[in-house]
Image (spheres, rainbow, N blue to C red):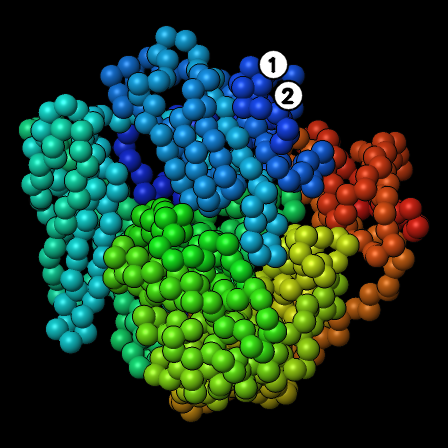
């Protein structure tokens, strides 16, 4: 046994490492951020020429990155939003190649520089850039105008409009790395790891360049591990790709695993003669995720895993994905027993992937092809190929990304549900895109998410099967029967239930799962070909889809849009925990802790290595009198129960016990005393669910009933003097301008209710 203090120290060090601001992929060239305040104008009626000649000083001001629909004035605007700002190049950039990069703009965009159209981009979640060397002014300010159009949408998630990720100017030499991609795949037969590092080099000069690439790999401890050199020739004004291959003994490497996310660092520089021209670095993991027969294997170990879909959504931040939100959400998902999912219907923000790399959350990424009659699900579609190109090029080195999906719930828009299949064109689309994925990356799982594979007319030829590594299907009721029918039609491959649910969980803190869903989660464990499930969803999310409550918050999550926990939170933590049970009993003489491992055919089921138990003792006044840690042996599915007994030397009256992962994430809790949740009286008034600071004020989240239409907010810097008032018809969230250094107190009522209790924003 060890003292609990060591856990706290480990946790602080671990989280500090995960929150470093250094980029996992970073060029050493100069970067000038264009984030900050931009002029903004929302209109779908103005001509491009009118916008280019506008008086931008008369426009509104919005922050980039950001979404216009988190602002009160534009909360429901769908159409074209125009962003404008000026910038001046640094003086030492005169002899550089200058590129303008957007990490994401939703959904379609056009970009003008000094009145000239640079180009357009379709797709709201992936980066794009322009070489502006010949157009940019070096002697005076430049004017940049960006149009973002959010009228295109698929799915039930909110189509947050605007420049949602970073905007940057980059200066590089005539020769640069476009990217470096590394694969590091262990072979458990030869006991070797096969490495392949591919480089894409761009030469913007008018001369052939004879180059040398020097590569260094540092191990997870930061020690230099490998050096390699590669010669490459790049013709004038051309781009060339070349690959460096080598092998290493398996015993010399540390594998990446969801419980042990070991990350290596790849550093490369390119030189001409003795002159270094460019350098780049990436982090990567050595791991192998594969489907063998009807099982899923990670690093040669069969695993059955659960996870959560997470919608990139917050009523205060839109889909801009600030680091703190991502850290809290993914750590919470890991705490709930989540290790693997098709996380969202669109490419994730890169900072989310970096954090998943470091914390050990595995995910399948997907492009936003969704639903019956999906307009982009057509054969040989250049638009969807481009989305795949951009997503895979950006995310290739992320250890957390273990698969690619080409769409979700694609089906015939016509006819009855029970007779639905994919149309011939949709079926051909999936096969085309799977082939395209394979041409870009042969090392990851390939899939598409189906909701038709269990239906009567589904069969090979109208349901993708042959080219998929992993069968993914969504189910909202009768899951055990649906999965059985799908397996009967399409045997021989593992099935992952990529979405599972049963009605909306509900908006209130006491919202919980239906008995039917809990029963289904228990029954699918008995199916040997089911390798896991993913709950839709971790979080509630804003939506204008059918059957969404008046608050505009779709209530499928175990936490609400503000991340307040519901009763369903504890339910799913127990269901998804890596052990069947954990408990403790005690009397005046002794204490016994019992841990019961999972069965081999259970979900989840995987080898637990490096786990610990932590227990805390309390006296009869409910005061803590000691905390200790027990290091567990390796625990395998099917092992006998573990029991730890010791004397009650301190006359404790209560014991709390918890199971911690190797990264010191608490994944299961238990207590010798049952706690009753305090009764919460129902209220006829709106409930203030959230208060949080924004760039220039306070964001307020509140409940909405079917009859509420107008809300009045009273607020001030003193509880006895709420001397300011705002009236709004916004549902569920509103922003108030307020100085950050002043206290803030608020209450709210609707046109049919009394005032809520006063709430204070805590510092």
Q: Nearer the viewer, residue 525 or 327?
A: 525
Image height check: is 484 above or below 611?
A: below
Neighbor class of circle 2 (other Cα within 10 Å; few <14, some 14-19, many 20+) is some
- Image quadrant in which you'd find residue 245: bottom left
Image height check: is 41 above or below 458?
A: above
Q: Position of residue 580 (x, y in %)?
A: 51, 84
Q: Position of residue 537 (x, y in %)?
A: 58, 64
Neighbor class of circle 1 (other Cα within 10 Å; few <14, some 14-19, many 20+) is few
Q: Is residue 533 visible?
A: no
Give the residue at x 57% y 49%: 153
Q: Do residues under tags 1 and 2 come within 8 Å of each other at their CB atoms?
A: yes
Give the residue at x 27% y 32%: 28
Q: CA distance from mark 1 to mark 2?
A: 7 Å
Helix or strand or loop: what does disc 1 sit on? loop
Helix or strand or loop: what does disc 2 sit on? loop
Q: Which numbered dot is residue 55? A: 1
Give the residue at x 21% y 42%: 200
Task: Check the picture and name the quadrant holding the N terminus.
Answer: bottom left
Q: Position of residue 310 (x, y in %)?
A: 54, 59
Q: Position of residue 47 (x, y in %)?
A: 58, 24
Q: Is residue 326 visible?
A: yes
- Left or right: where 208 falls relative to 299: left
Q: Nearer the viewer, residue 675 or 301?
A: 301
- Left or right: where 228 falls relative to 688: left
- Left or right: where 160 falls relative to 716: left
Task: Check the picture and name the quadrant holding the C terminus.
Answer: top right
Q: Nearer the viewer, residue 615 or 307?
A: 307
Image height check: is 239 above or below 350?
A: above
Q: Nearer the viewer, residue 92 or 741?
A: 92
- Left or right: where 274 falls relative to 626: left
Give the residue at x 75% y 63%: 508
Q: Which numbered dot is residue 59? A: 2
């Amino acid at each position: 046994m060890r003292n609990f203090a060591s856990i706290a120290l480990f946790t602080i060090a671990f989280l500090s490492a995960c929150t470093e601001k250094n980029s996992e992929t970073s060029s050493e060239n100069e970067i000038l951020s264009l984030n900050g305040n931009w002029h903004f104008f929302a209109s779908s009626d103005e001509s491009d020429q009118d916008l280019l000649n506008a008086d931008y000083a008369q426009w509104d001001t919005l922050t980039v990155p950001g979404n216009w629909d988190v602002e009160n004035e534009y909360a429901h605007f769908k159409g074209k939003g125009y962003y404008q700002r000026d910038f001046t190049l640094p003086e030492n950039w005169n002899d550089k190649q200058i590129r303008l990069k957007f990490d994401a703009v939703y959904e379609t965009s056009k970009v003008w520089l000094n009145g000239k159209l640079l180009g357009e981009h379709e797709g709201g979640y992936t980066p794009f850039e322009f070489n502006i060397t010949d157009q940019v002014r070096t002697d005076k300010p430049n004017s940049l105008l960006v149009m973002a159009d959010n009228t295109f949408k698929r799915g039930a998630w909110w189509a947050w409009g605007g420049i949602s990720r970073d905007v940057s100017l980059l200066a590089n030499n005539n020769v640069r790395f476009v990217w470096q991609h590394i694969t590091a795949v262990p072979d458990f037969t030869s006991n070797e790891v096969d490495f392949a590092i591919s480089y894409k080099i761009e030469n913007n000069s008018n001369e052939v360049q004879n180059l040398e690439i020097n590569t260094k790999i540092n191990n997870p401890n930061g020690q230099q591990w490998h050096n390699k050199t590669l010669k490459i020739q790049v013709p004038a004004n051309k781009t060339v790709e070349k690959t460096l291959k080598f092998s290493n003994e398996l015993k010399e490497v540390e594998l990446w695993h969801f419980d042990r996310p070991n990350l290596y660092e790849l550093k490369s520089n390119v030189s001409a003669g003795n002159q270094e021209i460019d350098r780049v670095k990436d982090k990567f993991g050595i791991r192998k995720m594969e489907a063998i027969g009807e099982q899923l294997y990670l690093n040669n170990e069969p695993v059955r895993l659960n996870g959560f879909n997470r919608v990139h959504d917050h009523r205060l931040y839109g889909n801009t994905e600030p680091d703190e939100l991502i850290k809290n959400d993914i750590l919470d998902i890991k705490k709930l027993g989540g290790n693997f999912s098709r996380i969202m219907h669109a490419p994730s923000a890169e900072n989310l992937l970096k954090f998943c790399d470091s914390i050990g959350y595995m995910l399948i990424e997907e492009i936003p092809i969704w639903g019956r009659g999906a307009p982009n699900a057509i054969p040989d579609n250049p638009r969807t190929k481009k989305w795949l190109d951009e997503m895979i090029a950006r995310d290739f080195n992320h250890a957390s990304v273990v698969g690619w999906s080409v769409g979700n719930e694609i089906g015939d828009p016509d006819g009855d549900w029970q007779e639905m299949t994919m149309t011939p064109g949709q079926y051909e689309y999936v096969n085309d895109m799977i082939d395209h994925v394979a041409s870009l990356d042969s090392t990851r799982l390939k899939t598409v998410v189906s909701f038709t594979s269990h239906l009567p007319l589904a069969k090979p030829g109208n349901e993708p099967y042959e080219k998929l590594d992993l069968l993914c299907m969504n189910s909202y009721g009768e899951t055990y029967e649906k999965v059985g029918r799908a397996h009967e039609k399409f045997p021989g491959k593992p099935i992952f239930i990529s979405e599972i649910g049963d009605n909306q969980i509900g908006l209130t803190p006491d919202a919980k799962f239906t008995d039917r869903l809990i029963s289904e989660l228990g029954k699918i464990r008995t199916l040997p070909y089911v390798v896991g499930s993913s709950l839709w969803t971790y979080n509630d999310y804003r939506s204008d889809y059918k059957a969404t409550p008046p608050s505009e918050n779709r209530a499928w999550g175990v936490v609400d849009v503000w991340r307040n926990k519901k009763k369903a939170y504890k339910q799913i933590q127990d269901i998804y925990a890596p052990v069947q049970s954990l408990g403790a009993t005690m009397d005046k003489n002794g204490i016994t802790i019992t841990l019961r491992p999972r069965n081999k055919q259970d979900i989840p089921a995987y080898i637990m290595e490096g786990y610990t138990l932590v227990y805390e003792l309390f006296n009869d006044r409910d005061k803590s009198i000691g905390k200790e840690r027990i290091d567990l042996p390796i625990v395998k599915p099917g092992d006998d129960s573990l029991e730890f007994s010791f004397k009650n030397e301190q006359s404790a009256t209560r014991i709390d016990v918890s199971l911690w992962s190797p990264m010191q994430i608490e994944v299961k809790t238990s207590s010798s005393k049952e706690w009753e949740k305090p009764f919460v009286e129902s209220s006829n008034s709106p409930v203030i669910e959230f208060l949080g600071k924004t760039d220039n004020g306070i964001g307020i989240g509140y409940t909405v009933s079917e009859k509420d239409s107008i809300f009045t907010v009273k607020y001030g810097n003193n509880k006895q003097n709420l001397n300011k008032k705002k009236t709004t018809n916004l549902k569920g969230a509103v922003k108030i301008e307020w100085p950050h250094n002043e206290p803030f107190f608020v209450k709210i009522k609707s046109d049919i209710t009394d005032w809520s209790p006063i709430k204070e924003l805590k510092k």
